[in-house]
Amino acid sequence: MKWSAMPGLGAYLVRHPARGFVMARAGWRLRQRQWWRKPPFLPLPNSQYWEFRSVTAQGVETLLTPHAMFEAAKWSLRQPVGR
């Protein structure tokens, strides 16, 4: 996943700090398995999976807005965990 694919997310979370917890929880659920074994050693989702989720959330191949990312994060936390 490229951080450039999330323009404005940092500024959005500065304006809405309470939403950072929801975003962090959703991001943790999307992390790759055994993320600590591969650089950059951060719990980031697989880039192909992230692209798939972005397309299925919007219905088209476009960048998600920060608000759309937050709404998708809220939705994902309401879903049962399959791991």
Image (cartoon, rainbow, N blue to C red):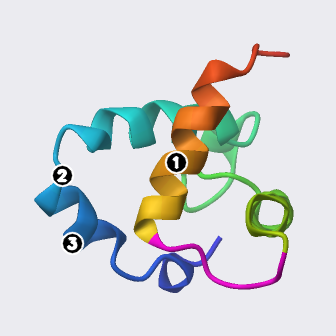
Q: Nearer the viewer, mark 1 or mark 3?
A: 1
For marks 1 and 3, the one nearer the N-term is 3
As measured in the structure, the alpha-carbon distance from the residue carrying label 2 to the one carrying label 3 is: 9 Å
Q: Which mark is residue 16?
A: 2
Q: Give SS at disc 3.
A: helix
Name the amino acid type tagged 3. Ala
Q: Which residue is mark 1?
A: 71
Q: Is most of the magenta stretch helix, strand or loop? A: loop
4 left or right of 22 in image: right
Q: Residue at x 24, y 57 (%)?
A: 13
In the image, residue 58 lies at what x, y percent?
74, 68
Residue 11: image tag: 3
**Compared with residue 77, is residue 66 higher up or lower down, i.e. above or below?**
below
The spot of residue 8 in percent (x, y) is: 33, 79
Label 2 or label 3, whichever lies nearer to me, is 2
Residue at left offset 13%, top offset 61%? 15
Image quarter of the C terminus: top right
